């Protein structure tokens, strides 16, 4: 049986993997998440997932598989990461208000010399938000550890009018695509049967 290490501090990613019956150990990666000048959102999320996986894989035996992911909100080709402060969070919510944005997650799975990456994009359309609603949402403390300053899986659901694409991708890990990746590596097998 292959040991799978999830290179993530996100409790949501672990819960999402558990939802599809995949057991893992957790070993968060600490990397610099600053975008590079001129880097496209897709290149950025891929690089982040790859660097998280590489940082953790370096400390593992060669037969251990490492899974890492990165999720970012993209609007007008700009990347919105986690808000740094209240002002930042309000500006993000105001920018997303009444418009459609993309949530991009990259997933990187590696074992030994083998490495595969995928990027999944979901479109999310926000309701029109007034200042009072944005302030009230900030007071819930949900925005701080989430890209784009909202969590669709929580009270942030009231901000969302529609989504087009994978829901789990917005929460941090596209489950259908990740499961296929794990299956291709021989890590996930049938449904409900756990790991091979
Ligand atoms: C848009 C959105 C993002 N998010 C989260 C998913 C990610 O955890 C987070 C984006 O930050 P990431 O850097 O992708 O992940 P992380 O810092 O939480 O964890 P790690 O790097 O250790 O794996 O935003 C939600 O939970 N709900 C949402 O609706």
Image (cartoon, rainbow, N blue to C red):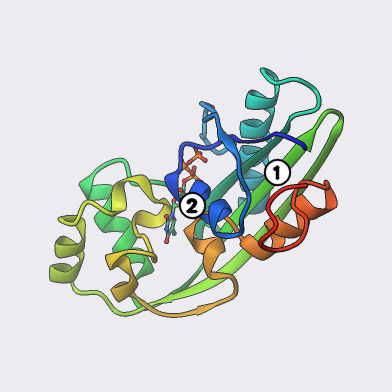
Residue at image mark 2? 15
> Quadrant of the rendered structure where residue 145 is?
top left
Disc 1 Cβ-to-ligand 1 distance below 8 Å: no
Residue under the image location 54 percent in, 59 percent down: 19
Q: Is mark 2 within 8 Å of ligand 1?
A: no
The residue positioned farthest toward the front in the image shown:
193
Query: Residue 14: x and y, percent?
Result: 51, 46
> Mark 1 or mark 2: which comes first in sequence?
2
Residue 169 in the image: state x and y as whole percent. 56, 62
State the residue in front, 124 or 141: 141
Name the residue nearer the viewer: 18 or 10: 18
Q: Is 10 left or right of 23, judged from the image as shown?
A: left
Give the left or right position of residue 134, taking residue 15 as reference: left
Looking at the image, the residue that sits furthest to the right is 113
Q: The residue tagged with tag 2: helix, strand or loop?
A: helix
The part of the image, by quadrant, that contains residue 23 is top right
Question: What secondary structure is found at the residue carrying circle 1?
Answer: strand
Could you tell me which quadrant the N terminus lies in? top right
Q: Is residue 75 visible?
A: no
Do we see residue 64 in this rendering? Answer: yes
* Location of mark 1 (residue): 108
Q: Position of residue 71 (x, y in %)?
A: 53, 51
Residue 25 lies, with reference to residue 141, above or below; the image says: above
**Residue occupying the point 54% across, 64% down:** 168
- Give left or right: position of 135 versus 74: left
Q: Quadrant of residue 49?
A: top right
Can you tell which of label 1 and label 2 is closer to the viewer?
Answer: 2
Crowding at mark 2 (Cα within 10 Å: few <14, some 14-19, many 20+): some
Q: Residue at x 30, y 46 (%)?
A: 144
Disc ID at residue 70: none
Q: Position of residue 139 (x, y in %)?
A: 15, 55
């Amino acid at each position: 049986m292959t040991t799978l290490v999830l290179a993530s501090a996100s409790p949501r990613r672990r819960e999402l993997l558990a939802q599809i019956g995949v057991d893992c150990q957790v070993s968060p990666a600490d990397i610099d998440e600053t975008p590079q000048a001129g880097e496209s959102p897709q290149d950025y999320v891929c690089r982040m997932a790859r660097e998280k996986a590489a940082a953790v894989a370096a400390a593992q035996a060669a037969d251990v598989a490492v899974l890492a992911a990165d999720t970012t909100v993209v609007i007008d080709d700009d990347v919105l990461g986690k808000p740094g402060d209240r002002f930042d969070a309000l500006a993000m919510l105001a920018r997303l208000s009444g418009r459609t944005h993309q949530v991009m997650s990259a997933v990187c799975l590696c074992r030994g010399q083998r490495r595969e990456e995928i990027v999944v994009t979901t479109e999310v359309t926000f309701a029109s938000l007034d200042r009072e609603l944005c302030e009230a949402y900030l007071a819930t403390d949900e925005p701080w550890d989430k890209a784009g300053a909202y969590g669709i899986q929580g009270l942030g659901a009231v901000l969302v009018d529609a989504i087009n694409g994978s829901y789990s991708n917005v929460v941090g890990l596209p489950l259908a695509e990740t499961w296929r990746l794990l299956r291709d590596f021989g890590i996930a097998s049938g449904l409900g049967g756990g790991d091979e």
